[in-house]
Image (cartoon, rainbow, N blue to C red):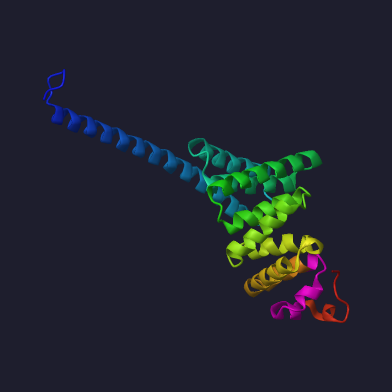
Amino acid sequence: MRTPGGIPGGEARKRALALALIAVLAAIAWQAARLGVADAYARAARAEIERMGYRSATQGELARAIGSVTQSLRYAPHDPFALETLAQLQLRQMHSATDGRRAAELARQAYANFRLALAARPTSALTWARLALAKLYLAEEDDELLAALRLSLELGRRDPGVPELASYVGLALWPRLDPELRQGVVRALGVSAARDAGTAFEIGKSYGRFDIMCDISSLKALTGKNCGPVRGPN
């Protein structure tokens, strides 16, 4: 059987299939190239964050990092890694903002980007912890914040960064936590203390929770006389 163009039907189908496969491979290669460029920009932004460390970042450093991650999102707008990186940078901008309204706007943007990142990667314990932190900065101590804190503990209480953030947020919300969530926060503080007792102590001290720290062996020595009969607030 021949097609109207004179090519045998079997050959025509084979040629059509070959052309379709070439088109698919070309599309895959194009997408891979886009993702490769996006990944390079996102990693550049992450490297900038690592260079900043915990010190206050300059506006120039923040601008460079945000520029890199923004370029990354042009090529891969739904990449959770880039979205979360942008949200982290927005929180750093929030800390350096001198205007209260601008700080709140940046915290809101960070919250939105953490949400987008979670839509693509809903099992990331660290992202849930960071979302809870953004909600805390927004003074939105609601059920969504408590759910985010709970999920961060359930999904990865021992994941790098999670115990510290969960402890910080959890102690800030202590009066609102149910017994199960309180227990999870205490365990997270214990995990943090086993890794870096100094950091865990500063988190507990910032909320005056010597009562909790006195029950964690790796922190008891640091609390000293604060482990007397006087206990912290409920």
Look at the image and tell me in which quarter the C terminus lies: bottom right
Q: Nearer the viewer, residue 6 or 87?
A: 6
Is 224 placed above or below 201 here?
below
Viewer-nearest residue: 98 or 215: 215
Q: Is residue 16 magenta?
A: no
Can you name the residue that lies furthest to the top here? Answer: 4
Q: Which segment is the magenta one?
A: 205-222
- At 65% from the left edge and 65% from the top edge, which residue is drawn? 163
Left or right placement of residue 68 versus residue 37 in this view: right
Residue 36 in sight:
yes
Horizontal and vertical percent position of residue 175:
82, 63
Residue at the spot 77% in from the left edge and 49% down from the top edge: 140
Give the image quarter of residue 221: bottom right
In the figure, residue 208 lies in which quadrant? bottom right
Q: Determine the residue positioned at 81% across, 75% down.
A: 211
Q: Does 224 appear above or below 35?
A: below
Extreme residue in the right direction: 230
Q: Quadrant of the N terminus?
A: top left
Q: How many marks?
A: 0
- Locate residue 67, reporting x and y percent: 58, 39
Q: Residue at x 86, y 81 (%)?
A: 228
Is residue 213 shown left or right of residue 11?
right
Which secondary structure is most common in the magenta stretch?
helix
Whether 206 is among the magenta residues is yes
Q: Position of residue 94 (x, y in %)?
A: 72, 45
Is 74 placed above or below 191 here? above
